[in-house]
Amino acid sequence: MRSDEYDRLYLSPPHLGRHELNYVHKAIEDNWVAPTGPNLDGFERDLSQYVGVQHCVALSSGTAAIHLALLLLGVGPGDEVIVPSFTFVATASPVRYVGAEPVFVDSEPTTWNLCPARLREALAARAQLGRPVKAVIVVHLYGMPARLPELLAVAAEYGVPVLEDAAEALGSRHQGQPLGSFGEVAVLSFNGNKIITTSGGGALLTNHAEYARQARWLATQAKDPAPHYQHSTLGYNYRLSNILAGIGRGQMELIEDRVKRRREIYALYQELLRPVAALEVGPAEPAGLRSNRWLTTVLLNPEYTEHTPEYLRQHLEAHNIESRPLWKPLHLQPLFTDSPAYGGEVCADLFRRGLCLPSGSSMTDADVRRVVKALREIL
Ligand SMILES: *Cc1c(COP(=O)(O)O)cnc(C)c1O
């Protein structure tokens, strides 16, 4: 069969349900599209209940949420922030927005997330240099929970607050506790490719009322308490609109279904690819950790194949199937060549051998079989 007889399979497209439109419709009917409004309040309530945190501030993007979180933690010019090297650039860019510098730390092989031993090494080394670190950003990549107890203990040992980047991990759990509830501040993303979407959006989560109050204030231009538009603090325009929050409310009704389907897709890939020695579906869930399986990833085993992930990607593309390399480590990015890095071999190896496969919750089992069939043609 010619490949163009198939529809294109995307990596992680938006997957809307039936009720988003009701919330959007209500906002328009009530002439309440801005500012803030009932959908925004409702979406924030849905999120804080689901994650189990006291406060939620819905924002225009996950990147904006990280920016505000850094400001809340007092990160400023000349400070340093620990960032995992293996993540999307948006974890690190806001560190530069506030005039601070990222210090990159390698992954550990079981979860692919921040390595606790390397974190301790980095914190000790920066302290030795007289460059105390202001915050540690922990990311749960592709939905897999990081080694939280160890990471939180190391950060606490050095008295450094943890910012949890759960942009890819809504619906994941650590010993039953939802991710996004572990950091002093945590962030979520509702970008179009994430597990739920508002087309674009993000949120800041925290148990500290003062942080939430400050985040709302900074996100709406930081007005002084005066009727005449007086300003003494630099503010931002980062609030999510009441329309987009309506999409988010509809999506939150579906979050458990979406997680369930992504996990089924991962399990089916794993079953169908078991006979293919050259490919390893990964990583497995360590005991007590439950991933939302935002994206299913595979690693090539060079003992069984000479192919590169890029060769696989082009082969899938010829079958009208979208796939993507794993995140290129940030310590290898031109933007960050001058930033300090501790380790980096683990994530560099993952990047060299890895590929993300189509994983959207709207995929059928037949779609998964189609991807596997295309892979098996060359492996
Ligand atoms: C998507 C993502 C972000 C940024 O979220 P946006 O809503 O796209 O700004 C930050 N960190 C990680 C790990 C992400 O995957």
Image (cartoon, helix red, strand yellow):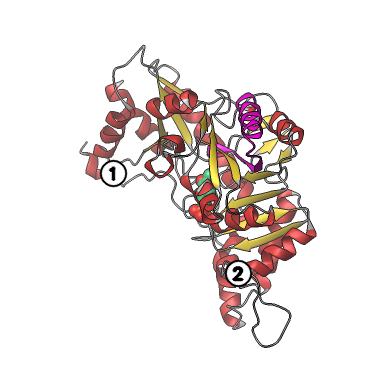
Q: Splitting the image into 4 quarters, where does residue 365 fall? A: top left
Most distant residue in the front direction:
130
Q: Secondary structure at mark 1?
A: loop
Q: Residue at x 63, y 62 (%)?
A: 58
Where the N terminus falls, by quadrant?
A: top left
The image position of residue 51, as x and y in percent, is 71, 49
Residue 124 in the magenta stretch? The answer is yes
**Residue nearer the viewer, 233 or 375:** 233
Q: Which class describes the residues within 10 Å of circle 1: few (<14), some (14-19), or many (20+)?
A: few
Q: Which residues are magenta?
A: 117-142
Where the C terminus falls, by quadrant?
A: top left
Tag of residue 212: none
Using residue 28 as the reference point, say whether residue 181 is left or right of it: right
Most distant residue in the top direction:
303
Q: Check disc 1 and give the amino acid type.
A: Tyr
Q: Check disc 2 and give the amino acid type.
A: Gly
Q: Residue at x 26, y 32 (%)?
A: 315
Q: Residue at x 73, y 80 (%)?
A: 225
Q: Which class describes the residues within 10 Å of circle 2: few (<14), some (14-19), or many (20+)?
A: some
* Residue 57 visible (yes or no): yes
Residue holding disc 1: 6
Residue holding disc 2: 235
**Residue nearer the viewer, 108 or 287:** 108
The image position of residue 221, as x and y in percent, is 61, 73
The image position of residue 247, as x and y in percent, is 56, 64
